């Protein structure tokens, strides 16, 4: 089976425990026509057949995978209450759980004491809050990120009407320090977005070198590690990536998405600020919302209003089972995804019919089938992507600049500005045991 269902039996026991809290309430029962629901739900299940097999290790394309079973069960259990983590009135237990997981995530990044943070509906909203705060602190200043950074930064700055510029990348796909310093010399840069694990090629910007530039120029550091943040726990990365992740505590703000490598359902992002005083920018009045307690209501430090408390319940429960410890099971599984990516990369690099690029810095592998012209290479990459799916292997593609690839493929005639390449995201712990199967299926495809 691809879909795990054995754990569902636990749910009824959990609901029995939750029901006891309402034992003093007068009897009340919602009338439900179960027989009427059944055929409609089965029709919905048929509709849901139109999906890729995200749970299977042969799905190795985009950043998609089901949550951990314990996260899924905790989320479902919470839905019987349906807490809203905007105010304590809507979710007392889930709000406390959120505060606890945020403390643990901040500790993972090197902030054991004061900080401000909360969960969000995803990385886009988390980054929006970070860049909004950046604008409050350095009004009118430009925000920069690498050309391989997530497109959300250029889009968010347009929404917030903040000046934005792109920084070139180096040979490893990381932010170019030469180009960054050139832009910093203008004195117009207020915030540098450092991406630790780009979503395209998995590159880790050189945070250690960026911190050195901060000694010469006045700017904030925002870390976008929506995808790669949990690699802070990994101990098997190459030295440049290890050095970058080791210094996350120097940032002014950090974003990570538990719904990516953190085993959570969508949507669950997290924004953290080193300086808790930035909470003053969130201040607002809501006389009918924050009246039940003098404790912090999470809506008082968030741009979002209603937020699913079920996300906090799922994350808290998962982190109870899989704590964010460097020597723990969760960290081991994160490391195994990098090892899987390295194993696939080595097969590509040692095959005369494939074109390798950079060693995986996280768990994303990018390569291309050998062809003499870039246009032919792009065409074959797309063909292999389509054909692989017909053989139950699900990969992805990515378009990369010819100017960057030329350094790696000197014998290719670059007759187009961008090249379509193969891309695989090996983000499941199980991928370590499936690299040979992935490779064998890929190499068996007709060309």
Image (cartoon, helix red, strand yellow):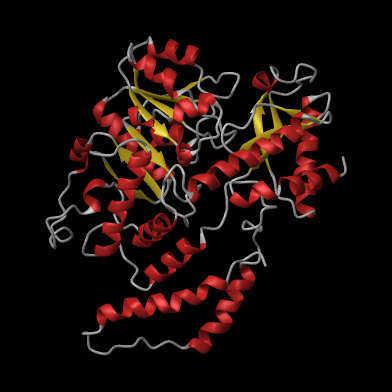
Measuring from the top left, give residue 24's x and y in whole percent: 21, 85
Which quadrant of the structure image shows residue 253?
top left
Query: Could you tell me which residue is drawn at 32 percent across and 20 percent down?
Result: 219
Query: Could you tell me which residue is drawn at 26 percent across and 80 percent down?
Result: 22
Measuring from the top left, give residue 123's x and y in whole percent: 43, 44
The quarter of the picture where the N terminus appears is bottom right
| 58 relative to 233, above or below | below
Q: Say whether residue 60 is visible.
A: no
Total labels drawn: 0
Query: Could you tell me which residue is drawn at 38 percent across and 9 percent down?
Result: 185
| 441 relative to 141, above or below | below
Q: Nearer the viewer, residue 254 or 21?
A: 21
Measuring from the top left, give residue 362's x and y in whole percent: 56, 36
379 on left or right of 254: right
Query: Could you tell me which residue is drawn at 25 percent across and 84 percent down?
Result: 23
295 on left or right of 398: left
The quarter of the picture where the C terminus appears is top right
Q: Nearer the viewer, residue 43 or 340?
A: 340
Measuring from the top left, give residue 148's x and y in whole percent: 54, 29
| 316 relative to 381, above or below | below
Farthest residue, direction front? 327
Which quadrant of the structure image shows residue 11?
bottom left
Q: Say whether residue 179 is visible.
A: yes
């Amino acid at each position: 089976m691809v879909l795990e269902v054995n754990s569902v039996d636990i749910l009824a026991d959990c609901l029995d425990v939750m029901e006891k809290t309402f034992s003093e309430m007068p009897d009340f029962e919602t009338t439900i026509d179960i027989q009427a629901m059944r055929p409609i739900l089965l029709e919905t299940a048929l509709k849901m057949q139109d999906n890729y097999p995200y749970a299977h290790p042969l799905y190795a394309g985009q950043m998609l995978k089901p949550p951990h079973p314990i996260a899924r069960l905790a989320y479902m259990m919470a839905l019987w209450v349906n807490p809203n983590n905007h105010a304590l009135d809507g979710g007392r237990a889930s709000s406390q759980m959120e505060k606890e997981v945020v403390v643990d995530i901040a500790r993972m990044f090197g902030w054991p004491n004061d900080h401000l943070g909360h969960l969000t509906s995803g990385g886009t909203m988390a980054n929006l809050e970070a860049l909004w705060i950046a604008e409050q602190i350095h009004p009118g200043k430009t925000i920069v990120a690498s050309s391989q950074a997530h497109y959300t930064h250029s889009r968010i700055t347009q929404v917030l009407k903040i000046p934005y510029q792109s920084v070139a990348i180096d040979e490893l796909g990381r932010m170019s320090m030469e180009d960054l310093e050139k832009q910093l010399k203008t004195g117009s840069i207020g915030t540098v977005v450092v991406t630790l694990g780009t979503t395209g090629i998995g590159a880790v910007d050189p945070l250690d070198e960026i911190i050195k530039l901060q000694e010469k120029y006045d700017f904030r550091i925002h870390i976008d590690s929506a995808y790669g943040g949990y690699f802070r726990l990994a101990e098997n990365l190459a030295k440049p990536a290890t050095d970058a992740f080791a210094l996350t505590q120097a940032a002014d703000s950090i974003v990570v998405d538990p719904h990516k490598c953190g085993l959570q359902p969508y949507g669950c992002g997290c924004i953290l600020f080193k300086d808790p005083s930035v909470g003053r920018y969130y201040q607002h009045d809501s006389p009918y919302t924050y009246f039940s307690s003098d404790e912090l209501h999470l809506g008082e430090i968030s741009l979002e209003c209603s937020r699913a408390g079920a996300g906090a319940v799922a994350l808290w429960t998962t982190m109870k089972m899989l704590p964010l410890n460097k020597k723990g099971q969760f960290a081991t599984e994160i490391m195994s995804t990098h090892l899987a990516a390295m194993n696939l990369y080595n097969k590509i690099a040692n095959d005369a019919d494939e074109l390798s690029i950079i060693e995986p810095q996280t768990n994303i592998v990018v390569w291309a089938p050998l062809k003499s012209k870039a246009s032919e290479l792009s065409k074959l990459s797309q063909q292999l992507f389509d054909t692989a799916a017909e053989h139950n292997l699900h990969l992805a593609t990515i378009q990369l600049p010819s100017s960057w690839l030329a350094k790696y493929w000197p014998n290719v005639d670059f007759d187009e500005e961008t090249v379509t390449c193969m891309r695989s995201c090996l983000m499941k712990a199980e991928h370590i045991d499936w690299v040979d199967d992935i490779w064998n299926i890929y190499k068996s495809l007709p060309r």
